[in-house]
Amino acid sequence: MFFKALLISIFSDACKIQSLLPFLAPFFFQKIMAVIPSIGLATQPRLLINIIRGLRTTHGKALLFWVAWIVMSVAFSIYPGGSFRFVTESLWIKLVPLFLVLAYGVSTESIDKMIWAFILAVAIFAVAAFVSHGLPRFQLINEYDPNESALMFVMGLPFIFWQLIDSRGLKKLLLTCLAGLAVIGVIQTQSRGGFLALVAVAVVSVSQYKNIGKVSKLKIALIIAAVAGILFIQGGSQYGERISSIFNSKLDYNYFDSGGRLIIWKHAITMMITHPVFGIGVDTFETGLARMASVGDREVWQAAHNSFLQVGAELGFPGLIAFCIMIFSSVKSLKKVVSAQDLASRKLNPVLRISFSMIGSWTGFIVGGFFLSQAYRNLI
């Protein structure tokens, strides 16, 4: 019962079910689904042991340090009230799902079921994105803006891809369709950061696939043709122009506007230099930017649009280092798991499938997160 409730919690939290189905909100559906597996921690001591074991890893220790640094930053914050509110109202809510995954995710079977819960959530958004063709940038719910929706699709694609590779028959066909819909979802969001993350995930996934299967030139050509067809039919010339604008320093506002990414990133680096130890305080980037980047009577209230600079500015260099260790140590551990498998056999086993999926998903976050403020979101 506890594990099934966790699967529902992962699904409902990823797709924000209470926003999709507002009638569930009065029943506190998402909170209840998180509370039930939490009760299991009190009734099954081994689950607590699993959490402790997970926190003893390099990335686990980095997480504990990072959380401690977030709490300590409140005392040095430029807006203590805002930072304190984040710690007391938001931080623990984001940590609970992580601890529950550590507690219950101790076998390939349990992790596989968690992955399917996430895939189902992505599927709902992918179908909705397909239906929204011809409308403005895709945004199904307020919790995810178009760029965040793109990141969700990109992080979900590696899980879909490797489940597809390891499936047969109707299941394989459905997953193939879902993979195509997820790509369409990235297009519908019109997110340029999402497009770059999609390319990175595709490169990593193909590279991984070479380790366990023979990749013919014909197969690669067919995949490229399929993706190009989706881009042309779904995106059209307008999407192509938007993507090409990434490299146009004269027309893209991100290069010269006070609210553009490059200007904001420069201010973020300045915050890191002027507040190198504890930063300006967790969840205060927009306040810090408004104080620093006022143009006449106009204050610039913008997110960092970069998860790494967001952490560096708000938590200083120690917080940024811990954040990077969490990510790259996780990827390194997954690569060790892959290298320990018998790749020469050219056979895909559950351990390889899960490891490849997670490495690909982390790749999507690293690239997509470089253009989004996602440091404290549940997606990671």
Image (cartoon, rainbow, N blue to C red):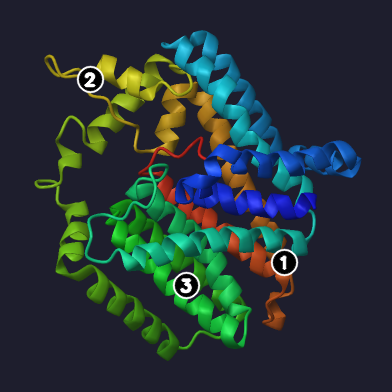
Answer with mark 1 or mark 3, whichever residue precedes in sequence: 3
Which residue is at the far bottom? 218
Q: Residues within 10 Å of mark 2 (few under 14, many from 20)?
A: some
- Residue 130 picture quarter: bottom left
Q: Secondary structure at mark 3?
A: helix
With respect to residue 178, does 295 lie above or below? Answer: above
Camera-nearest label, 3 or 2: 3
Q: Residue 78: x percent and y percent?
A: 41, 11
79 relative to 212 in the view: left or right: left
Amino acid found under the numbered disc labelled 1: Val
The residue under the point 15% across, 34% down is: 257
**Which residue is label 3 attached to?**
178
**Which residue is label 2 attached to?**
293
Q: Secondary structure at mark 2?
A: loop
Camera-nearest label, 1 or 3: 3
The Cα–Cα distance between marks 3 and 2, rounded to whole angstroms, is 43 Å
- Residue 117 picture quarter: bottom right
Q: Residue 316: x percent and y percent?
A: 48, 22
Q: Quadrant of the C terminus?
A: top right
Asked whether residue 380 appears in the rendered view, the answer is: no
Answer with mark 2 or mark 1, whichever residue precedes in sequence: 2
- Residue 89 picture quarter: top right
Numbered tag placed on residue 351 in the rendering: 1
**Nearer to us in this view, 362 or 287:** 287
With respect to residue 235, does 380 lie above or below? Answer: above
**Nearer to us in this view, 213 or 378:** 378
Q: Secondary structure at mark 1?
A: helix
With respect to residue 211, does 263 lie above or below? Answer: above
241 relative to 366 in the view: left or right: left
